[in-house]
């Protein structure tokens, strides 16, 4: 497939896979419409084969209950008045999540349960308050989906002339005077709310170099979705850069097209907060040997973070409870369960998973398998016209296996047995949290990505059957791996070869 066709296909998949809670063109005064997102019992469910009844007790419904408890912490963040809300690293809600996980580990009966506090977080970017509106011909519209991207600069309350600049490509800036103005561009999700075409094509740098006073990127999901697209380490923008939902963006474009001389009013307060803390939570199930199975999940999120990553935390808890019910002698290897944070923000080398990678080499040297629990279930959604239709199926996921062909065969077989929908080809290098530690030991994950980093990431878009299939497949993989010697799971390195 040629590169241009690959790009078109990727964009179409991205648009199809992503959604909004709004249904466009619906006459709300008419008969009640069917729900856009179906209840869990309406989804297609993969039958449990008779040979796999050992995994029948692993419950998607129980994981969904955990998701509801975890996302309640995020909603508390929002209800406490935080515009920048969720289980944000370094906040009280980050700590609440760690304490919740530790309480679950103790309830289950894990040993050596502890909360490891990291006091070495680098300064964290925090947008503390903002408001954006557009006014034209006597009408003012509050743009409620306006949300600053990571490392945006702040600005005092200012009125700016908006300039439409298409997709933000070089051709879109030709002949446009944007100096001292607010550039407005459209971003195609690539493939979800975490990124978009305007960010990847250099629209931020292009607008800065042209002297723009601010940049607004309209996220191309139907409806009015709020998003925080990026995370981690990134060069600070020299101007305010904010996301907008499609409906809010259309309001600006409509005023421009009607020549109503609109003004964008923007105010954004940003701080760099030092001295914040975060934590990892640890728990152990001793086995018959000191070899190890490591099971991990990251805890921080933007917005409710039901899929990203309450689904992963819940999956990890369900696995811990399943294996805690087995006698030690039936666990060939010790199991170490742990969380990481600062996934969406810089951790430095001495906090979060970077610390674990740097300082737990002795554990990883004896680790037969790393199981990364991240984004384990999401509804498959389709774009029909200018609205979205939720399906009764779980979407396909990105996936990765790092290790020997024997391990790859175990993972592939388990995915097929339990009906895990995956992309036709694996990641060449894992995204998500696994990308930090995948070289430390044999590893695998599945990871979905369409609705993440948006306020669509709610429990109703995380299907229970998908959670159940994932946790059962994970358990089957762990059990199969425990029948294989560690050397047969690892890929031989050049330095391991006899001379």
Image (spheres, rainbow, N blue to C red):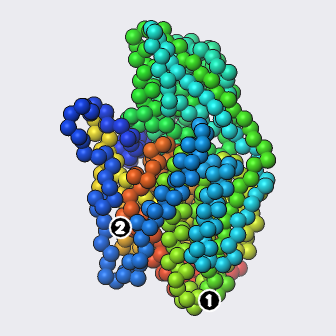
Q: In x, y percent, where is residue 425?
A: 43, 58
Name the residue rendered at 39%, 52% in the picture: 460
Quarter of the picture holding the C terminus = bottom right
Residue 13 visible (yes or no): no
In the image, 358 versus 334, the foreground residue is 334
Report the residue marked by disc 2.
Answer: 419
Say which of marks 1 and 2 sits in front: 1
Report the residue marked by disc 1.
Answer: 288
Looking at the image, is 329 positioned above or below residue 308?
Answer: below
Side of 269 relative to 216 (left or right): right
Looking at the image, is 233 positioned above or below residue 160?
Answer: below
Q: Residue furthest bottom?
A: 329
Q: Secondary structure at mark 2?
A: loop
Q: Specify which label sits upstream in the sequence, 1 or 2.
A: 1
Name the residue rendered at 49%, 81% in the picture: 479
Q: Quadrant of residue 266?
A: top right
Q: CA distance from mark 1 to mark 2?
A: 31 Å
In the image, 138 versus 412, the foreground residue is 138
Count residues near mark 1 (Cα–Cα under 10 Å), then give few for <14, some for 14-19, many for 20+.
few
Looking at the image, is 373 positioned above or below residue 188?
Answer: below
Q: In x, y percent, where is residue 244?
A: 50, 30
Q: Residue furthest left?
A: 31
Q: In x, y percent, where is residue 155?
A: 67, 23
Q: In x, y percent, where is residue 450?
A: 44, 47
Side of 487 relative to 65 (left or right): right
Side of 436 relative to 388 (left or right): right
């Amino acid at each position: 497939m040629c590169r241009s066709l690959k790009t078109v296909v990727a964009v179409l998949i991205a648009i199809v896979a992503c959604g909004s809670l709004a249904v466009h063109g619906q006459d709300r005064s008419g008969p009640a419409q069917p729900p856009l997102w179906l209840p869990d019992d309406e989804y297609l469910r993969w039958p449990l084969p008779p040979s796999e009844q050992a995994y029948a007790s692993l419950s998607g419904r129980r994981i969904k209950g955990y998701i509801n408890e975890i996302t309640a912490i995020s909603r508390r963040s929002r209800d406490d008045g935080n515009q920048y809300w969720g289980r944000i690293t370094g906040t009280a809600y980050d700590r609440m999540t760690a304490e919740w996980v530790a309480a679950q580990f103790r309830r289950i009966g894990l040993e050596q349960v502890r909360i490891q506090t990291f006091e070495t977080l680098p300064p964290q970017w925090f947008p503390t308050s903002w408001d954006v509106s557009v006014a034209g011909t006597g009408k003012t519209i509050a743009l409620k989906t306006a949300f600053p991207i990571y490392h945006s600069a702040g600005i005092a309350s200012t009125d700016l002339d908006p300039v439409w600049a298409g997709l933000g490509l070089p051709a879109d800036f030709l002949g446009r005077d944007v100096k001292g103005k607010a550039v407005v561009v459209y971003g195609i999700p690539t493939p979800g709310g975490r990124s978009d075409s305007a960010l990847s094509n250099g629209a931020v740098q292009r607008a800065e170099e042209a002297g723009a006073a601010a940049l607004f990127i309209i996220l191309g999901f139907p409806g009015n979705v709020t998003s925080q697209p990026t995370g981690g380490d990134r060069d600070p923008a020299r101007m305010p850069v904010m996301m907008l939902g499609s409906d809010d963006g259309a309001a600006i474009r409509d005023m421009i097209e009607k020549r109503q001389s609109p003004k964008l009013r923007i105010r954004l307060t940003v701080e760099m907060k030092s001295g914040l803390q975060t934590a990892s939570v640890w728990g152990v199930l001793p086995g018959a040997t000191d070899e190890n199975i490591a099971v991990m999940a990251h805890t921080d999120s933007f917005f409710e973070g039901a899929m990203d990553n309450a689904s992963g935390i819940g999956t990890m808890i369900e696995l811990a409870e399943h294996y805690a019910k087995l006698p030690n002698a039936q666990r060939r290897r010790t199991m170490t369960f742990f969380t990481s944070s600062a996934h969406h923000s810089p951790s430095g080398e001495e906090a979060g998973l970077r610390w674990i990678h740097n300082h737990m080499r002795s554990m990883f040297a004896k680790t037969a398998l790393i199981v990364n629990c991240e984004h384990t279930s999401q509804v498959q959604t389709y774009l029909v016209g200018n609205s979205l239709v939720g399906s009764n199926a779980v979407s396909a996921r990105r996936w990765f296996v790092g290790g020997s062909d024997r391990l790859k065969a175990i993972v592939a077989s388990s995915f097929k047995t339990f009906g895990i929908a995956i992309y036709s080809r694996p990641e060449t290098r894992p995204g998500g949290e696994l990308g930090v530690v995948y070289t430390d030991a044999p590893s695998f994950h599945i990871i979905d990505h369409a609705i993440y980093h948006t306020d669509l990431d709610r429990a109703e878009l995380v299907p229970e059957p998908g959670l159940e299939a994932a946790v059962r497949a994970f358990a089957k993989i762990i059990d199969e791996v425990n029948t294989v010697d560690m050397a047969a799971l690892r890929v031989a390195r050049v330095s391991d070869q006899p001379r």
